[in-house]
Image (cartoon, coloured by chain):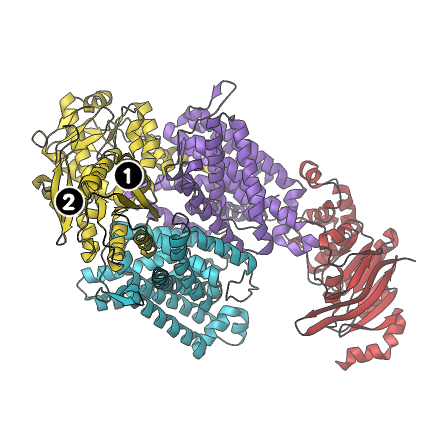
Amino acid sequence: MKWLAAGAAAAAAIFALIAPLLLKPFGIYLISMWAVLTIAALGLNLTLGYAGQVSLAQGAFVGIGAYTVALLTPVGCPFALAFLAAGALCFAVGWVLGYPALRVQHHYLAFVTLAFSTLVFLVLRNEEWLTGGIYGINGVARPSFFGWSTFKALNFYYFSLGMLAVLAAATWWMLRSPWGRAFVALRENPVRALSLGLDTRRYTLMAFAIGSSLGGMAGALYAPLVQFIEPVSFTLGLSFNLLLMVIVGGSGYFFGPFVGALIAVLLPEWMRVAQGYYLIVYAMLVMVMMAFCPSGILGLLERALKAFAPRGKEAAP
Amino acid sequence: MASFFQLLVSGLATGAIYALIAVGFTLVWQTSQTINFAQGEFVMLPAFFVLAAMNAGAPFWLAAAISIVVSIAVLGVLFKLVVVDPMLKYGVLPLVISTIALSLLLKEGAKEFYSSQAQPFPALVPAADIDILGAVVSTQSLAVLAVAIVTVVALNLLLNRTRLGRQMQATAQNSTLARILGIPVERMVLYTFLINAVLVAIASILISPIYLAKFNNGDTLGLAAFIAAIIGGFNQVRGAILGGVILGVLDNLSAAYISSQYRGAFPLVILIAVILLRPQGLLGRVEERTI
Amino acid sequence: MSRRALFAPLIVAGLGLANPAHAQSTVYIPAVLELSGAGAVSGTNFRDGMLMAIDEINAKGGILGKKIETPVLDTQSDAGTSRAQVQKVLDNKPYVILGPVFSGSVMVDMLLTQQAEIPEIVGGEAAAITQKGNPYVFRTSFGQQFSMPKIANYIRDGVKAKSVAVLWVNNDFGKGGRDTFIKEMNARNIKVAADISTESGQADFSADVVKLKAANADAIFVYVNEEESARFLREAKKQGINKPLIGETTLLGQKVIDLAGGAAEGVQGHVGLTVDAPNPAVQDFAAKFKKRFNYVCDHNGIKGYTAVYFIKFVTEKIGKFDSKAFAEKAHGITITPKDEPGILMEASWDKNGDIDRESFLGEVVGGKQKIVKVLPKLGN
Amino acid sequence: MSAVLQVSNLRKSFGGITAVDGVSFEVREGEILGIIGPNGSGKSTLFNCVLGQLSPNGGEVRVDGKPTTGMRPCDLNRLGVSRTFQLLQVFPQLSVRDNLILAGQEHRGTMLSRLIGRADAGLGDAADQMIAFFRLSHLSSAPAGLLSYGQQKLLDAAMAFMAGPRLVLLDEPAGGVNLTMLGHLRERLQAYHAERKATFVVIEHQMEFVMALCTRVLVLAEGRIIAEGAPRDIARNPAVIEAYLGH
C-alpha cells in the first residue's frame, strides 16, 4: 500500500514536471494557480484536517500575504525577504486569531474567522493610503533569482512548483515529527492529551499560526502570478473555495489538498462546455461528491484500497 | 435627535427582516446541526416564484400563496430530503460545503433561468410616508415591521404554548432524550425545515418591493442573518430576533455617527466580542453539543 | 494517490490543449465578460448588446465575408479568473478581444493583450485604463476623466452650487467616479461638504440621507448603481431632501425612474450613453433589444452593441484581419451613423483609445427623462 | 517515608451539590493507595481536582511538598504525576506505538527539538519495551481504535507509565475488564510497581482487585472520607458496609 502511494506520488510529480511542456500559456497559468492554491490548502488542511480547528479565514491570509509582497517589493525589498515577511506576518496574525480557538470550540471558531476575513476585506478596501483601496495594486513584478527570471509563464510555474515542493516537504516533516502526533492527539482527545503533558494551548496556536502562514506564503506567490491584486479577490469566496479543496480532497490526508485544489481549479474549466450553466453543473457535482464521499476523494480511495488490503492504512502520519 | 429616532425606526424595519431570516436559520441549526450557508439564497428565491406565478397570470395574493407552498416543497422538504438527510451522519463540514455549493446553484439558477436584471416587485401596501414624532416612515417599512412581529409572535406561541412546539424544543435541546420520551424526532426536524421555508418565503415577499427581486440579493442577506443569529444566540429563537434588530439599528447608527466606510465592520466586531465573552450568545443557552 | 495519475489525460483535455480549429470562414473575436458575481448585470447587458450586433452582421454575411465567431467566457467578476480567460483566448490567436467591464479586470488583461499585440475593446470606465500608454486598449464609453468634468461644469454653471455633497458606491465604479469628481470640484473650488460611501447591494439609505441633510450642501451628487439609485431616491424623498440631486447617466436612466416611483422627479444631471438619448437610432436599438431580451438595457448594452460595429467598420477600412493594423487604424478614427448605422451615434477614438461622443444634460420630468441640452463632442 | 501527594481539606461543589467535601489525605512514597466508595461518592471528582482538570472551590494539593493547586494538567504531568481515565481514553487513529510515544514525547527536549528531532522523539525503544511489558507487541502497529476493550485498558495504563512518573492515579482500571484480562492487568501493575518503585493511587469498585493490589484503602462517601486502613480491616468496617448497603 505504502509502495502504491509512493509510486503514485512519484508518477504525479513526474507528470507535474512534464505537463507544462505539453500545455499552452493558459494551461500553464492554471496549473501555476493550482500549485499556489495547493500551498494555501495545505495550510488549511493542517489546522482543519490535523488539529481539527475550523477556519474560514484562510482566504484572508492569502490576501494578507499577497499585499505584503505587493507592497514590499516595489520599495526595493527582495522577493525572498518579502516572501518570508508574508509568512511571518500571517504566522503572527494567525497566532493571535488562534486565541479564540482556545476559548471557544468548533463552529464558534468558524464564526470568528468568518468575521475576521470580512474585516480584512474592509481594511484592504478602505485603507487606500496603504493598500491602494478598491483599485488594488497593479503590475506586481515576478521575481528573478541570480539572473533567472520567473517572468515567463513556464518559469513561474516551475518556481511555484518548487515552492510547493519545499513547503510540502517541510509540512510532511513536521507531520511525521512529534508535532504531527501532537496535532492528531489534539483533534482526537484534547483532555487526554493534556493529561499526558501536551501543552494543548501552545500546539493549538501553533497549528493555527503555521496553517495561516502557509496561506500567507501562498498569497506571496499569488500576487506575482496574477500580477494584480484587489481586495475582492480575498473575500469569503476564496476561504470557502479553499475549505472546499481540503474537504473534497480529503481532510486529514496529506495529499488531500493536492487533489482538492486540482479539482477546484480544473473542474469549473472542464464544465465550461456547459456554457452559461457551467457554474450550476459545477455546484451540482460538488454536492453529489459531498453526498457520496464526504471523507473526500482520498477517503473514498482509501476505502476502495482497503477492500484489497484489509489491514492497510494510508492515512495521515 | 429627530434624526437619531429616524435611524432607529428604519433600523428596526431592516432588523426585523434580518430577525425573520435568522430565526429560521437558528431553528434548522438547532434541530439538525445544519449551518445553512444558502439561507440568503433561500430568501432570494421565493420572490422569483411569485414573479413566475404572476407571469403565468395569477393575481399577486395567489402568486404569493403559490410561492409559499412551492418554497415549503422545495426549500423545506426537498432541501431536507435531498441535501441534508444524506449528509447528516457525516458531521457538519461536508454539509457546510454542500450548502455553499447550493447557494451558488440557486444564485446561478435564478440568473440563468429567470433574469440577471433586478425585477420590480409589487408592493404589499400602497407607498406612502407617515410622520411619527419627527421620523418619517414609509408604509412599506411599517408593513414589514408589522408582519415580522406577527410572524415572530405566532412562532413563539407555537413553540412555547403548543404541545407540538414543546416537542420541537425538546428535540432541539436534546434529540436523544426527546426520542426516549417518545417524541417523533424525525417529524419534528422536518417541521423546523418547513417553518424555515415559510419564514424565508415571507421575508422574501416583504423585502422584494424594496430590494427588488435579484439573483444576488442573498449575498448580503445571508451573512446578515448569520451574524444576527450568532450575536443573539445561535441556539435561541428570541436571541436571533434580538440579534437581527441590533444588527439593523447598529448598522444605521454606525454609518451615521462613526464611519460609513466601516459600517459593515461594527456588527462583526460585536460578533467576535460576543463569541469571546459570551459564546452562547446574548440570550443563548450554553451548548454542550460538539461537532 | 493513483487518482492523481488518472487525472493526467483529463488535465490536458481540461486545459484546452486541443483548440477548436477555426474554420477559414469565420473570424475569432472572443468576449471575456462578468457573467456571474458582482458584475453580472453589466456583463450580461454588454453580452446581449454584443450578440445582437453579431447576429445582425452575420445575417448580412459577416465582416469581409467572414462570419464572427464569439465564444463568451465568464470572469466570475474576479481579476484572476479574467486573466486566465484572456490567456485562454489569446492562445487561440484572436483577431480582437471584447470586454471585460470591471476596470480591475481590464487593468490585468491589458498587460496580456498588449504583449500579444491584440486589440481589446473594454467596457471599463476608470480613468487609469487609457493613461498607461497601451496602444491596444479601446473604450466603448466615456472614461470618468471625461464625464466628470461635464458634470462639474454643470454643477458650477447650471446649478451654480458653491458646495456639494457626494454619495458614492464603494466599488471600483463608484470609487473611481468619486475620486475624479472630487478632483474636478477642487479644480473649480467648489466645497465638498460631505463625502459618503455606501455599499453595493445596500438596502437602507436612511443613515446616508440623514448625513446628507446634515451637510446641507447646495447640491448632492449621486454616483451609485441602478437599484441603489432607486432605493436612495425613495429614502431622499421620504426624508424630504430639497436640494438638487445631480446624477451621471445611471441616476437619470429610465429604469431607475421606474424603480424609484415618483421619487426621481426633478433629478438632473449629465447623461452619457443611454437608451433614452433623443436619437431615433438609439431608441430603435433599445426597442429591438427589449423585444429580444425582454428587459430594458443599460448603457453597457449599447457599449457591447457599438463595440462590434466599431470592429466591423475599422476592419473594413483596413480591408484585412490584421490585429496590429486594426490598432493603428482605430486610433484617431471617427465613425458616423451615415457610414455605419450600427454605431448609433457619431463617435471618435483618440490616440489613447478614449472614445468621444456627444452627450446630454437631462432632467426627470413627469416620470420621463427630458434632455434639456446637448453637449457637443469634446473634440470640436 | 515522605509524602508524594498531600491533599488537605479539598472541596468541590457543582451548583448546589457538594461532590467533594473537605477531603484530606496523604500518599506515601511507594505505596498503592486504594480509594473506594459507592457511585457518586466523589471519587472521580476528587481525582479531577487533584489533577487540575477541575479547579477546586477550596483546599490545597501538594506534590512533593510543592503546592500544585490550580496547576494545568500538562504541567502537573511534567512534574511526574500521570493518570488513567475511567472511560477509555486512547487515540484511536494513532498506532499503539504512537500512542505510547505521544505519552512520553512531551517529557523530553523542547518544542524545537521535538520539531526537528527524530520522528519517534528517541522513544522508539522505550515504547517497544513498554509494549512488550504489557504483552501487546503483536499489535504494535495497529491503530489503537482496533484493539479490544481490555487491550485498550492495558494501553491506557501503559501510556500513564510511559513517562516514568513517580505518582500514578488510576481511575477504575479494572472497570469492564473480563477476568482473565483482569488478572493480567493486576499482575502487570504490581510488576511495574515493584520494578519502578512508583506510587499508585487507585479508584476501584472491584473489591478483590483492590484487596489484592492495594496496601492501604480510603473509603469515600458523600464527598467525605469515612474510613481508612489496611484492606482487610476496611472490608470488616461497619461504617463502610453501611455506606455501601445503606444506599
Q: Position of residue B90 (x, y in %)?
A: 50, 56
Q: Which residue is mark 1?
A: C181
Residues at discs 1 and 2 in contact (Cβ within 8 Å) = no
Q: Quadrant of residue D245?
A: bottom right
Q: Which residue is mark 2?
A: C362
Give the chain coloured red.
D
Residue B161 seen: yes
Give the chain coloured purple.
A
Give the chain coloured cyan.
B
* Mark positioned earlier in the residue sequence (1 or 2): 1
The residue depicted at 12 percent of the width and 40 percent of the height is C373
Position of residue B196 relative to residue C312, above or below, is below
Residue reaching furthest top? Answer: A147
- Amino acid tagged 1: Phe
Residue A49 seen: no
Q: Chain of mark 2?
A: C
C91 horizontally vs B22: left or right: left
Mark 1 Cα-neighbour bin, 10 Å: few <14, some 14–19, many ≥20: many
